[in-house]
Amino acid sequence: MIYRTATERLIHLSKTFRSVAVVGPRQSGKTTLCRAVFPEKPYVSLENPDVLEFATIDPRGFLSQFNNENGAILDEIQKAPHLFSYLQQILDETKTKGLFILTGSNNFLLQENITQTLSGRIAYLQLLPLSLEEMKTGNFLKNNYAWHIITGGYPEVISEDIKPTDWFPNYISTYIERDVRQLKNINNLSLFMKLLRMCAGRTGQILNMSSLANDCGIDQKTVAAWLGILQSSYIIYLLKPYFNNYNKRITKTPKLYFYDTGVACSLLGIKSAEQITIHAAKGSLFENLIVSELLKNRFNVGENDNLFYWRDKTGNEVDIITENEGNLTAIELKAGETISNDFFKGLNYFSTLETPNTEKIVVYGGNQTQNRSNNITVKPWNNFIE
């Protein structure tokens, strides 16, 4: 097993709350992590038809099997949403911490039921695919960022050395068959797949639902609903715009990214790392790689998403803005391997609008760290997380 950074956070939450929900995309390593951290707990998968039938017909009897100090790991709990009401009673009557560990791959269904029944009784941990730091710890980190873009971070692809061109098409089709069919508003899977591919072609771009609707031949309400499903299933990520009252002439629409670049590459038909180096989407995919790394870094330590981008109406832009306790960090993402003055234009302009002590960072495709003038730090793509 590749060591997961989220291990410490999961242990901490299990000692603080009576239950913990570990959520994230399918195959991100949720089950492996939970079984490794809690080897004494019985493991039950609700994907098993027999188990699901038992839990559906006799939920009290099903949960009574685990009504002891060990509790259980209940995998893919969103398959049996009715269990949450019964879990509520059990958790209300116990003082045992970390009694039930729940996992799920659909955040919408989990959040909906947790909010209704288990609020205050359960903690949340989001587990995304492997980060670059985790790959480094497991000796899987390469010197070529294009390799990481096309390979993505799913543990099975990395640890089993499976070709992305073999794994991702099957992953995508399985996701459609198993997850999307159980959700509402999907009455045409071919159109849904078309929308998904259109999203891949717009990676790193400002979301334009009108354009997506026109290109797919569906209305904007359907686009919005389907994008919501893709978000809740950890396929696409919408980067929120950053805006302050100092300037109203700014873009207030999110930018579209994927939680995993391997999925985006598969949808774009990219079959090799060499192809990425000459592909029109190279810069956008590099941005996506770093955005997903920043998200993983936050989620692994239990922090919420605090990533934004900034762009004004005249085209001045900063790729990432983070805000921590009122302190801003502005980050520019550049796929180029040679540092140039163009890297710093957006950061320098933004610093004239914001506080002078805004931390400014350029993450680029090269391998050197530099401290430049105007308080700008240049960091390589494979060593920028602190």
Image: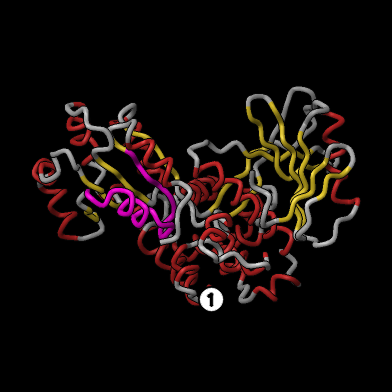
Q: Residue at x 45, y 55 (%)?
A: 3
- SS at mark 1 in the image: helix
Foreground pick, 85 / 156 = 156
155 vs 37, left or right, is right
Foreground pick, 133 / 178 = 133
The N terminus lies in quadrant: bottom left
Name the outermost residue toward the top.
Answer: 245
- Identify residue for label 1: 165
In the rendered structure, which amino acid carries the disc numbered 1?
Answer: Thr
Q: Quadrant of residue 297?
A: top right
Q: Residue at x 16, y 49 (%)?
A: 55
**Above or below 180: residue 22:** above
Is 296 inside the magenta-drawn segment?
no
Q: Residue at x 59, y 51 (%)?
A: 292
Residue 348 x %, y %: 87, 38
**Above or below 289: residue 158:** below
Which segment did they paint magenta? 20-40
- Report the colour scheme: secondary structure
Residue 260 x %, y %: 55, 58
The C terminus lies in quadrant: top right
How many numbered markers are drawn?
1
